[in-house]
Amino acid sequence: MTQISIIVAIAKNYAIGKNNDLLWHIPEDLKRFKKITSGCPVIMGKRTYYSLPKRPLPNRENIVITDIKDEVIEGCTMAYSIDDAVNKMDPEKENFIIGGASIYNQFMPIANKLYITWVHKDFDADTFYPDIDFNSWMETERTDMPVNETLGFSYSYITYIRK
């Protein structure tokens, strides 16, 4: 079975973005994201792809989902539906769903693992993560980070696997 993992940073009010950008800049979280996803396929929507500071993301197969038939983005594997993206995933590796909200929503029912950075603060946003039914997930790993004076909030890295 293909390993499908979601990796995301979510605010206390489930906010994940505004104006196609992140709501915060947590250098440690970006390093963690790079370490976890390096060498593995990353799957995202086109708006998320264009929001990346460096694209395609290096040392990862970038699978970009678009509903525009025959659209091509140089250096990326194109998928034209969720099913097409699943078919293009590497069955030998962990495949990471990296956004945005619509893509997360569509992959939640079939994801096996969640890597969530919970940001312990509410944010003004226009993009939110879908509700999570925690009865379906088991926490397997947790690291609580203290309040970062520069950021003004604390956060936690929590990994869940589907029950």
Image (tube, rainbow, N blue to C red):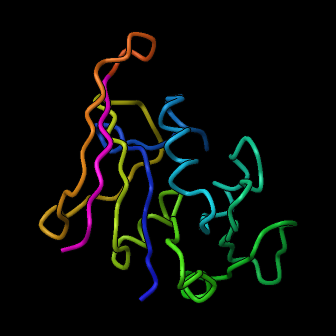
User: Which residue appears farthest toward the top when viewing the image?
Assistant: 149
Q: Is the residue 25 above or below the residue 111 in the image? A: above
Q: Which residues are magenta?
A: 154-163
User: Which residue shows up at 60% across the image and 64% down it?
Assistant: 42
- Magenta part, dominant SS: strand
Residue 23, magenta (yes or no): no
| Coordinates of residue 127 in the picture (x, y in percent) | 47, 47
User: Which residue shows up at 82% across the image and 76% down it?
Assistant: 71
Q: Is the residue 136 above or below the residue 110 in the image? A: above
| Coordinates of residue 129 in the picture (x, y in percent) | 38, 53
Number of numbered discs? 0
Name the side, left or right, on which 157 lies relative to 42.
left
Residue 82 vs residue 61, the one in the foreground = 61
The C terminus, quarter of image: bottom left
User: Which residue shows up at 28% across the image and 48% down it?
Assistant: 158
Name the side, left or right, on which 64 lies relative to 70.
left
User: Which residue shows up at 76% across the image and 45% down it?
Assistant: 54
Name the side, left or right, on which 131 lies relative to 102.
left
User: Which residue appears farthest toward the left when viewing the image?
Assistant: 135
Residue 162, magenta (yes or no): yes
Location of residue 1 (image quadrant): bottom left
Location of residue 149 (image quadrant): top left
| Coordinates of residue 31 in the picture (x, y in percent) | 55, 38
Name the side, left or right, on which 113 lies relative to 36.
left
Q: Is the residue 91 above or below the residue 60 in the image? A: below
Residue 40 vs residue 126, the one in the foreground = 40
